[in-house]
Amino acid sequence: MARPEMLKLPEVLTEIRMSRAAFYRMRARGQAPRLQKLPNGQLRVSRADLDAWWACCEERVA
């Protein structure tokens, strides 16, 4: 079974075209994709979570 793709936060920010500050404001409101913190403190977002977040954003607009 293949492991899910995990994206680094800068990769996510580039893809969604958002600043780190704006992302953290969204996260504080509970509106950002789910982050996973690694034991070394780095943050990751799974591709599946990011895709689900995009789909949710599209539903809100429609």
Image (cartoon, rainbow, N blue to C red):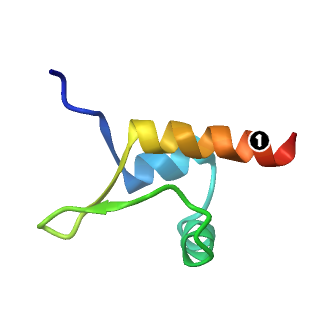
Looking at the rendered image, the quarter that the C terminus falls into is top right
Tell which of 12 and 39 is nearer to you. Answer: 39
Q: Is residue 22 left or right of residue 58?
A: left
Q: How many marks?
A: 1
Task: Classify mark 1: residues with Cα within 10 Å, few (<14), some (14-19) or many (20+).
Answer: few
x and y percent of residue 61 in the render? 85, 45
Q: Is residue 37 left or right of residue 15?
A: left
**Image point 12% across, 66% down: which residue?**
39
Measured along the vertical axis of the image, is residue 44 above or below residue 1?
A: below
**Image point 20% across, 70% down: which residue?**
41
Mark 1: secondary structure: helix
Q: Is residue 46 left or right of residue 51?
A: left
User: Which residue is denoted by mark 1 in the rendering?
Assistant: 59
Looking at the rendered image, the quarter that the N terminus falls into is top left
x and y percent of residue 3 in the render? 19, 31
**Image point 38% across, 60% down: which residue?**
35
**Image point 47% across, 48% down: which residue?**
12
Q: Is residue 11 left or right of residue 37?
A: right
Residue 11, located in which quarter of the rendered image?
A: top left
Tell which of 13 and 36 is nearer to you. Answer: 36
| Type of amino acid under label 1 | Glu
